[in-house]
Image (spheres, grey):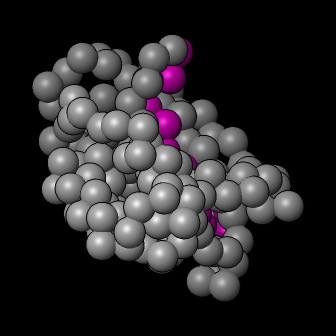
Amino acid sequence: MPSIDEVDEIILRELSKNGRATLTELSRKVGLTPAAIKNRVEKLEKLGVIKGYSAIIDHSFLGEFLTALIEIELADPESDELSKLIRPILKLENIKDVYKKTGEFQLTIRATFRDVDSLNEFLKKIRRDYLKNMARRIKVSIILENFKEGGVTLL
């Protein structure tokens, strides 16, 4: 794991709250020059500590009115085939997050959809085309309201 110091940690916390924070804003928080902040941010990017930047958007403006958590119980959670089968799923635009986790359902997908019909089509497609016989059970929960996303409070 890359080594970071307290200043790097402050920079990371600030960027996680506001990925568009300027070098000047960060320098005020940390007490270093913008040039020093730039060097640190570039170092954190090269080390892979900062994995990317993204915007938190309202998906309804893209015609995606439904967000679902799709939990999958895997027949064999330790299978070497899993990562090969998941790679194409990761490329689907409506997939927002994919987690392998402990518990009864070892895979969780957060995705957005136009409507229930498109969700149902997606479920059929991942079972048929991607997961094949890897999924023992699939459980779906619909998100009714989102209060915080990507570290940003939405209320």
- Lateral position of residue 141 relative to residue 71, left or right: right
Residue 127 sits inside the magenta stretch: no
Work out whether residue 32 or residue 129 is closer to the camera in this orientation and state it.
Answer: 32
Q: Position of residue 33 (x, y in %)?
A: 38, 69
Q: Is residue 61 above or below residue 150?
A: below
Q: Position of residue 65 (x, y in %)?
A: 70, 71
Residue at point 79%, 53% (across, down): 147
Q: Is residue 4 above or below residue 21?
A: above
Work out whether residue 11 or residue 83 is closer to the camera in this orientation and state it.
Answer: 11
Residue 71 visible in the shown view: yes
* Image quarter hosting the C terminus: bottom right
- Lateral position of residue 100 relative to residue 76, left or right: right
* Image quarter hosting the N terminus: top left
Residue 113 sits inside the magenta stretch: yes
Residue at point 60%, 83% (across, down): 62
Residue at point 54%, 66% (across, down): 28
Residue at point 69%, 64% (across, down): 66
Q: Quadrant of residue 75?
A: top left
Q: Quadrant of residue 154?
A: bottom right
Q: Position of residue 130 (x, y in %)?
A: 28, 47
Count of marks overlaid on the render: 0
Query: Over which residues does the magenta segment extend?
Result: 104-116
Residue 51 visible in the shown view: no
Q: Quadrant of residue 70?
A: top right
Q: Is residue 15 above or below residue 85?
A: below
Q: Residue reaching furthest right?
A: 155
- Lateral position of residue 55 relative to residue 142, left or right: left
- Lateral position of residue 113 relative to residue 90, left or right: right
Q: Position of residue 77 (x, y in %)?
A: 31, 19
